[in-house]
Image (cartoon, helix red, strand yellow):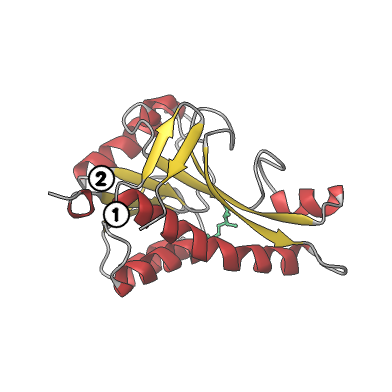
Amino acid sequence: MPRENLERLAVFASGRGSNLEAIIAASEAGWLGMTIALVLSDVPGARALDLARSKGIPVETIPFDEAAGREAFGEALAGACKGHGVTVVALAGFMRILPESFLTQYPDRVFNIHPSLLPAFPGLHAQAQALDYGVKVTGCTVHLVDAGIDTGPVVMQAAVPVLPGDDVRTLSERILVQEHRLYPRVLSLWAAARIRIEDRRVWIDDAR
Ligand code: GRF
């Protein structure tokens, strides 16, 4: 059976969920190539959860519990994913670092989108970092998640110009347009088994 009939995606989001919206749109248009099996948030009331509910997608809310600690959080996330038969995970504005106890359950199967051309400007406020540095080109990156912060293998990137007079809002909006194109595209390539990972290097069979 081709992989697109098997893969079950979880999207993790802490907030607005515009990337989730783009992924749902690709699914509704029939080219995502996998089932969105779960939307998970650490923030009760996140807009992403409302969006998922409105589309009939199963949701889970797992707030971070300081007392229980990071590894217990990872185990809870993994438990929810396994419960929904999840095979691949897309972080889309998920504001928590994934613990080892989660990543070991999904090796090379967790994607993230970051609003800069990594390895430039990892971490928080990437658009502000780019403006403060004075770069002329920035963009967005889909990468695989490893134990570091925005350090995993780069899968695909899109460049975006920094224009005179840009502020964080205008630059973020311009980057977001590219995020919404890039992320569903990467996930559909994954679903079609057209992404191959060799150590840090990711090869994409984009020819078909
Ligand atoms: C995006 O800019 C993404 O690159 C970053 O967090 C933001 C999430 O936005 N990781 P949204 O919740 O998908 O609208």
Q: How many marks?
A: 2
Residue 109 appears in which quarter of the rendering?
A: top left
In screen coordinates, is 118 left or right of 2? right
Q: Quadrant of the C terminus?
A: bottom left
Q: Quadrant of residue 27?
A: bottom left
Q: Is residue 20 left or right of residue 177?
A: left
The secondary structure type at the circle numbered 2 is loop
Instruction: Please name the residue shown 38% across and 71% down the image.
Output: 25
Q: Nearest the camera: 6 or 124?
A: 6
Location of residue 17 in the rendering, given as x and y in whole percent from the top left corner: 48, 63
Mark 2 or 1: the one toward you: 2
Confirm if mark 2 falls within 8 A of ligand 1.
no
The amino acid beneath tag 2 is: Val
Query: Residue visible at 87% across and 52% down?
Result: 134
Residue that carries the numbered disc 2 in the rendered image: 86
Label 1: how many Cα within 10 Å (few below 14, some 14–19, many 20+) = many
Task: Where is residue 9? Give x, y as percent.
Answer: 30, 51
Residue kind at label 1, given as amino acid type: Leu
Whole-percent x and y of residue 161? 75, 62
Relative to residue 182, is residue 114 depicted above or below? above
Residue in the picture at 45% in, 36% down: 65
Asked if the residues shown at circle 2 and circle 1 are in contact, with their CB atoms under 8 angstroms apart, the answer is yes
> What's the distance in space between the residues labelled 2 and 1, CA to CA?
8 Å
At horizontal 26% and vertical 43% (from top left) the residue drawn is: 87
Image quadrant of ligand 1? Answer: bottom right
Mark closer to the chain start, 2 or 1: 1
Q: Is residue 69 visible?
A: no
Which of the numbered marks, if any, corresponds to residue 38?
1
